[in-house]
Amino acid sequence: MKTETKEIQEKRKKEIETVSTMIEIYCHGSHGTKKGALCEQCEKLKEYTTARTMHCPFMETKTFCSACKVHCYSKKMQEEIRKVMRYAGPRMLFVHPVLAIRHVKVTLQNKRKQAD
């Protein structure tokens, strides 16, 4: 297994942090859990997304899973994470503005690169 640069390790960490925060927002709003706590279903989703991110071979070149050419999530988990994103995405700006702005910044940078 090749070693990763600190930059790629940091990128993995940030992606896991962003997705985990979105799952927490979704679980709190949809399942009534306490802030920071997850129900069993959402905990499994968080573990699944973390495992996929940790083993992603495209981390060096991709921005977010939604922009990846290869979708490694099972169909069921794709549906689950889409529900989470639809719910938590608009709320991120109020709950965690730094993560939301970082996500928008990276998305815009990627779109510019693709346009060039």
Image (cartoon, grey):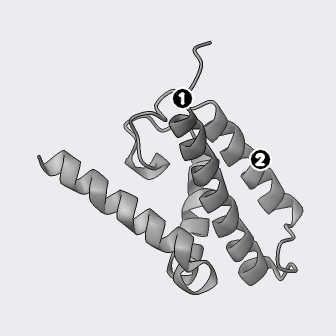
Q: Amino acid at mark 2?
A: Glu
| Label 2 crowd bin: few (<14), some (14–19), many (20+), radius 10 Å | few
| Label 1 crowd bin: few (<14), some (14–19), many (20+), radius 10 Å | few
Instruction: Assign the N terminus to one quadrant of the image.
Output: top right
What is the residue that sits farthest to the top in this orientation?
Answer: 1
Q: Which residue is mark 2?
A: 47
In the image, residue 70 sits, relative to residue 108, either above or below, namely: above
Q: Amino acid at mark 1?
A: Thr
What is the residue that sits farthest to the left in this orientation?
Answer: 116
What is the residue that sits farthest to the bottom in this orientation?
Answer: 94
Instruction: Residue at 55%, 69% (x, y): give it.
Output: 99
SS at mark 2? helix
In the image, residue 67 sits, relative to residue 102, either above or below, namely: above
Q: Which residue is mark 1?
A: 5
Of residues 72 and 110, the one drawn nearer to the viewer in this rendering = 110
Residue 70, how many percent across, how many down?
43, 34
